[in-house]
Amino acid sequence: MMSEILLVHVIDDDDAVRDGLAELFASVDLETRTYASAAEFLAILDTGPLGCIVTDLQMPEMTGLDLLSHLRAVGVDLPVIVISGALDRARGEEAMRRGAAHFFDKPVDDDALLAAVAAVMPQVR
């Protein structure tokens, strides 16, 4: 796996959240790709550029927790930041146990999220 991470993959079933996060990352010159579902992201995983992942916790079909488990089971160790609008501390703690680098409740503080991305993406520090 590449040591330099160059791309933020944003996975959220809410169009407005995806667009808002893409604009936030673009404001600090981070390239971003957005996906409406975990399945959409997984479809490009083997061929797409590496990077970190910012994913929603609650999505139809495959949740953020399911995505984390799947990634780790197939040996993908990309940094994952999980966000949730559910205000569910137990599921946030579970996300961290499954390997998430950070967990945030929605609405996400822009500066905190950018700091978390910077923490897992050394070239933007």
Image (cartoon, rainbow, N blue to C red):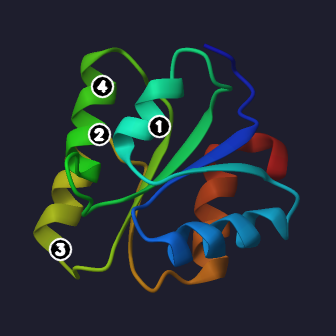
* Mark 3 burial class by Cα count in 10 Å: few <14, some 14-19, many 20+: few
Name the residue rendered at 22%, 33% in the picture.
Answer: 69
Residue on which the image places disc 3: 89
Q: Which residue is mark 4?
A: 72
Please give the name of the residue rendered at 70% of the width and 21% of the height, measured from the top-left corner: 3
Q: CA distance from mark 3 to mark 1?
A: 25 Å
Residue 99 x/y as whole percent: 31, 40
Disc nearer the start of the sequence (4/3): 4
Q: Which residue is mark 1?
A: 41
Q: Depth-wise, is mark 2 or mark 4 nearer the camera?
A: 2
Q: Are marks 2 and 4 in contact (CB under 8 Å)?
A: no
Name which quarter of the figure residue 57 lies in: bottom left
In the rendering, which numbered label is found on residue 98? Answer: none
| Three-letter amino acid code at the position of disc 4 | Arg
**What is the spatial separation of the Cα atoms under label 1 and label 2, in whole angstroms?**
10 Å
Q: CA distance from mark 4 to mark 1?
A: 15 Å
Residues tagged 1 and 2 counted as in contact (Cβ below 8 A) = yes
| Residue 85 position by quadrant | bottom left
At mark 1, the secondary structure is: helix
Assign a secondary structure to mark 3.
Answer: helix
Going from the N terminus, do you reach mark 3 or mark 2 first? 2
Residue type at mark 1 is Phe
| Mark linked to residue 67 | 2
- In the rendering, at what x and y percent does residue 117 appear? 63, 56
**Which sits earlier in the primary sequence, circle 3 or circle 1?**
1
Residue nearest the viewer, comparing 40 with 101: 40
Residue 98 visible in rendering: no
Is 20 positioned to the left or the right of 68 in the image?
right
The quarter of the rendered structure image containing the N terminus is: top right
Earlier sequence position, callout 1 versus callout 2: 1
